[in-house]
Amino acid sequence: MVANIAIAVLLALCVLSTAICCLALILVKDVFNRMHYLAPVTSFSVLALLAAVALQNGWSQGTIKTILILLVLFLVNAVLTHATARAARVRQFGHWLPHPKEHILGAPHGPSSQL
């Protein structure tokens, strides 16, 4: 009985956090700010889902598969977010390097300083 309630709460948290992040993706205008709302879905929501699966099934094949999916999402999220930010910057400025006006210490500036 208590396990069923815990599973329902974990699944509700998973769905609620995902729904809030989806709503934020719709409402936020800047692509760079939108990327911040992808992380909770691939971290908190998946952890809540993993906990629910583990409570329901124990250490089973389904739990192990959920752990593998969680690890893949953690790794892919960072790479995909970086690639998306870089592509958005190239689309906006024509190159990914910072402009001299951005005052980033130690960073090469402009497209002519690409190595």
Image (spheres, rainbow, N blue to C red):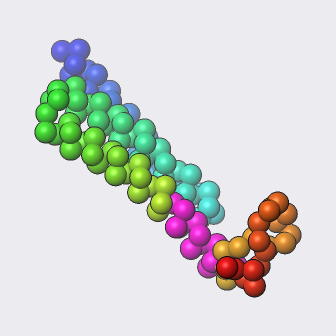
> Which quarter of the picture shows residue 50?
top left
Q: Position of residue 21 (x, y in %)?
A: 48, 48
Q: x and y percent of residue 106 in the render?
A: 80, 62
Which of the 4 image quadrants contains residue 49?
A: top left
Among all residues in the image, which is located at the extreme front? 115
Query: Is residue 29 at least partly visible in the picture?
Result: no
| Residue 106 in view (yes/no) | yes
Q: Residue at x 32, y 27 (%)?
A: 9
Q: Is residue 92 left or right of residue 72?
A: right
> In the image, which residues are magenta?
81-93
Q: Quadrant of the N terminus?
A: top left
Secondary structure mainly formed by the magenta segment:
helix
Residue placed at 17% from the left, 29% from the top? Answer: 59
In front of the other: 98 or 47: 98
Q: Quadrant of the C terminus?
A: bottom right
Residue 79, percent across and down?
48, 60
Image position of 92 with respect to 16: above or below = below
- Give left or right: position of 102 versus 24: right
Q: Nearer the viewer, residue 103 or 47?
A: 103
* Residue at left offset 27%, top offset 46%: 68
Q: Viewer-proximal residue, 28 or 109? A: 109
Q: Position of residue 61 (x, y in %)?
A: 13, 39
Q: In which quadrant of the rendered view does residue 64 lie?
A: top left
Magenta span includes 6: no
- Residue at 66% x, 74% y: name it: 96
Say how many tags the image has.
Answer: 0
| Residue 89 is one of the magenta-drawn residues | yes
